[in-house]
Amino acid sequence: MEKSKIQSEQSILTSESFLKHWQAHRRLTRKVIQEFPEDKLFSFSIGGMRPFSELAKEMIEMAGSGLHGVVTGKWVKYGELEQYAHNREPKSKNELLTLWDEITVQIDTLWPKIPSGRFEEVDVAFGQYEGTITSFIFYFIDNEVHHRGQGYVYLRALGIAPPLFWERD
């Protein structure tokens, strides 16, 4: 019985493997952005859903401001963060991909600053969502996977084969 208790208290994810998992999803989502024709990225939608560029911007904002909140405990909107104040609304696929890449670098830069005990701390993200830091990061990933799925539907509707969902390298 004691062995079961010890095993249940062991972590199945290290901080490094958690980051690696998230960044693998981000690499795949970047491939989805790349597959879109320039004109369709900002305009194509189905059933009243937002264009994929809007979904990608949401993912960018959530990752940028969300990870800032994880590290600092200060949950502010993306546009209110000094390091992102220079970013204007992307008007082209290249600008969107550049912004995506900037956030990817920010994630890699900020991640090591998360104290190990912080992952299980309870916080209130953006002044309204209570949960553990781990649950917030899982939400950032889940939200990205959800919106990437919408991108897959869009690409297929446009006659474009999306990247294989399991190839996250």
Image (tube, helix red, strand yellow):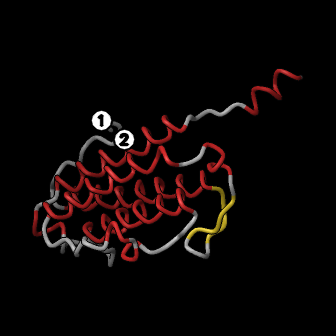
Q: Amino acid at mark 2?
A: Ala
SS at mark 2? helix
Q: Residue 10 placed where, x, y %?
A: 70, 31
Q: Tell me which corner region of the image, top left, top right, bottom left or bottom right, holds residue 23.
A: top left
Q: For the C terminus, which image quadrant?
A: top left
Badge 2 crowding class, 10 Å Cα cut-off, few under 14, some 14 to 19, many 20 or more, is some
User: In the image, 50: left or right of 21?
Assistant: left
Tell me if residue 49 comes above or below residue 21 in the rendering. Answer: below
Badge 1 crowding class, 10 Å Cα cut-off, few under 14, some 14 to 19, many 20 or more, is few
Q: CA distance from mark 2 to mark 1?
A: 6 Å
User: In the image, 66: left or right of 147?
Assistant: right
Q: Amino acid at mark 1?
A: Asp
Q: Tell me which corner region of the image, top left, top right, bottom left or bottom right, holds residue 155.
A: bottom left
Tell me if residue 79 comes above or below residue 63 in the rendering. Answer: below
Are circles 2 and 1 on residues that touch, CB within 8 Å? yes
- Residue designated by label 2: 24
For the image, the number of numbered tags is 2
SS at mark 1? loop
Which residue ends up furthest to the right in the rendered image?
Answer: 1
Q: Residue 131 placed where, x, y %?
A: 66, 61
User: In the image, 115: left or right of 140?
Assistant: right
Look at 34% across and 66% down and name the residue there. Answer: 83
- Residue designated by label 1: 169
User: In the image, 35: left or right of 152?
Assistant: left
- Whichever of labels 2 and 1 marks the residue nearer the N terminus, that label is 2
Q: Residue 50 placed where, x, y %?
A: 31, 74
Please tell me which residue lies in front, 16 or 109: 109
Look at 13% across and 60% down and name the residue there. Answer: 94
Look at 36% across and 76% down and name the residue there. Answer: 79
Please tell me which residue lies in front, 42 or 125: 125
